[in-house]
């Protein structure tokens, strides 16, 4: 059994000429919403073994807020591939995760996260707003087996 927690980063500054999309930081409201999401995930009994985040600033900041709330002791894994991945590339990435991790939390971006969730859950057809999460559980022994036909919804926050 493997659990996958997909988290869309919280609200960020608007992109503009002075700031690149990759460098956008969380707004005050974004920080508050990330903290609120963390509390909701704790109520859902989310306890990740590994946290992987896009290397975009807003995703890293969201992951740090979640990790602090979870009292997560390990290092966050910052992965450039997550920033611009398609849902198929994300699936390939998950297939390479070591099998000892039973619960994986990924902080990333839309449209990829929503597309991945929709491909694995027929009842998930809406776009994930900022500071939202979808929990998926797979009846598999290793991440290399991850597939939609092994998936069930745990929660949608």
Image: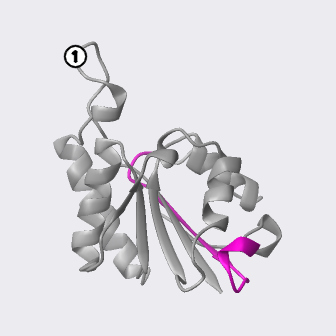
Camera-side residue: 2 or 99? Answer: 99
Total marks drawn?
Answer: 1
Q: Residue tagged by mark 1?
A: 18
**Corner quadrant of residue 17:** top left
- Asked if residue 2 lies left or right of residue 27, the reply is right
Q: Secondary structure at mark 1?
A: loop
Residue at left offset 28%, top offset 70%: 67
Where is the N terminus found, in terms of image quarters?
bottom right
- Range of the magenta residues? 129-145
Query: Where does the image place residue 62, in percent across and percent down from the top left?
Result: 30, 55
Residue at left offset 32%, top offset 23%: 15
Query: Where does the image place residue 49, in percent across and percent down from the top left?
Result: 43, 81
Query: Where does the image place residue 32, in percent across and percent down from the top left?
Result: 21, 54
Query: Where does the image place residue 22, in percent across and percent down from the top left?
Result: 35, 33
Compared with residue 85, is residue 49 higher up or lower down, i.e. above or below?
A: below
**Corner quadrant of residue 51:** bottom left
Compared with residue 101, is residue 56 higher up or lower down, i.e. above or below?
A: above
**Corner quadrant of residue 11:** top left
Colour mapping used in the image: one colour
Q: Is residue 75 magenta?
A: no
Compared with residue 73, is residue 91 higher up or lower down, i.e. above or below?
A: above
Residue closest to the far right:
149
Residue closest to the far left:
28
Res 117 visible: no
């Amino acid at each position: 059994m493997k659990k996958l927690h997909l988290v869309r980063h919280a609200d960020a500054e608007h992109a503009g000429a002075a700031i690149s999309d990759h460098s956008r930081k969380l707004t005050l409201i974004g920080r508050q919403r990330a903290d609120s999401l963390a509390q909701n995930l704790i109520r859902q009994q989310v306890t990740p073994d590994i946290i992987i985040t896009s290397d975009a600033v807003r995703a890293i900041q969201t992951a740090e807020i979640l990790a602090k709330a979870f009292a997560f002791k390990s290092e966050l894994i910052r992965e450039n591939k997550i920033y611009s991945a398609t849902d198929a590339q994300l699936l390939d990435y998950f297939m390479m995760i070591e099998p000892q991790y039973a619960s994986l939390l990924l902080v990333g971006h839309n449209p990829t996260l929503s597309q991945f969730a929709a491909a694995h859950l027929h009842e998930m057809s809406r776009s994930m707003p900022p500071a939202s999460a979808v929990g998926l559980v797979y009846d598999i022994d290793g991440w290399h087996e991850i597939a939609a036909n092994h998936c069930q919804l745990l929660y949608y926050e």
